[in-house]
Image (tube, rainbow, N blue to C red):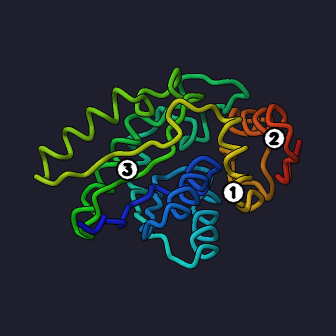
Amino acid sequence: MIENKKCVVILSGGLDSVTVTYLVKSQGYQIYPLTFKYGQIAVKETLAAQKIAEYIETNTKIIDLTALRDIFQTSALVNRNIPITSEFTTPIIVPFRNAIFLSTAVAYAVTLGANKVFYGAHDSDVCFYPDCRREFYEAFEKAAKLGTDKNIAICAPYNGKKKVDIVKAAVALNVPLELTWSCYLDGEKHCGQCEACVERKKAFIEADIFDPTKYEN
């Protein structure tokens, strides 16, 4: 039997999702990326995702969920009235975001005849984000199979790995790190002070790898 090599990848434009994209590309998959606009302040995420898709000679399908901004008003990632901190705080969470993205990705996979959906969950996030945990995506996979009658796998290839491991993997996969966007804000450069920037800086330092990111601070 010929292996089905079509897959959907949730591509945010950040380091984690881009590294996942390059990983599955290296494994010979035909990639169908999805990028979501959900009212986030960091509009450069979407631009980064588009650049990365072009870089690997494909296109990412932009899903406009901007209307969800009103639903996500408890999150600092969409609400400018909530301060964004340099350490993790609960307002950074966008409630049930990955579930919403994965639902769309599963529907797209059914349309394409793909049997895998990839996203960038990893161990550095599991203590903070419930929808990055193995228990969550394994349960979601069961729900997806029940809801579609299709054998669609939800894959988080860096589960069990830390952010520093993703940086190392990105270098090994020749990811254009300078094109990725992690910052929660929308400045000309990464702010260097939000929680995402702090974690990005820390991962490069721990990996002992040069960080090509341009930071304001």
Distance from label 1 to label 3 (Cα)?
19 Å
The residue labelled by disc 1 is: 180
Q: Are marks 1 and 3 in contact (CB under 8 Å)?
A: no
Q: What residue sits 57% from the left and 62% below the top?
A: 46
Question: Element under label 1?
Answer: loop
Helix, strand or loop status at disc 3: helix
Kind of residue sitting beneath label 1: Thr
> Badge 3, how many Cα within 10 Å: few under 14, some, many 20+?
some
Crowdedness near tag 1: few (<14), some (14–19) or many (≥20) residues, C-alpha within 10 Å: many
Q: Where residue 75 sits in the image (x, y, percent)?
A: 51, 35
Of callouts 1 and 2, the N-terminal one: 1
SS label for mark 2: loop
Q: Residue at x 45, y 58 (%)?
A: 36
Identify the image quadrant of the N terminus: bottom left
Please give the name of the residue rendered at 41% of the width and 41% of the height, measured from the top-left corner.
97
How far apart, in angstroms, are the residues tagged by discs 2 and 3? 27 Å
The picture places residue 35, in percent across and down from the top left corner, at 47, 61
Give me the disc on residue 101: 3
Residue 162 pos. (x, y %): 63, 31
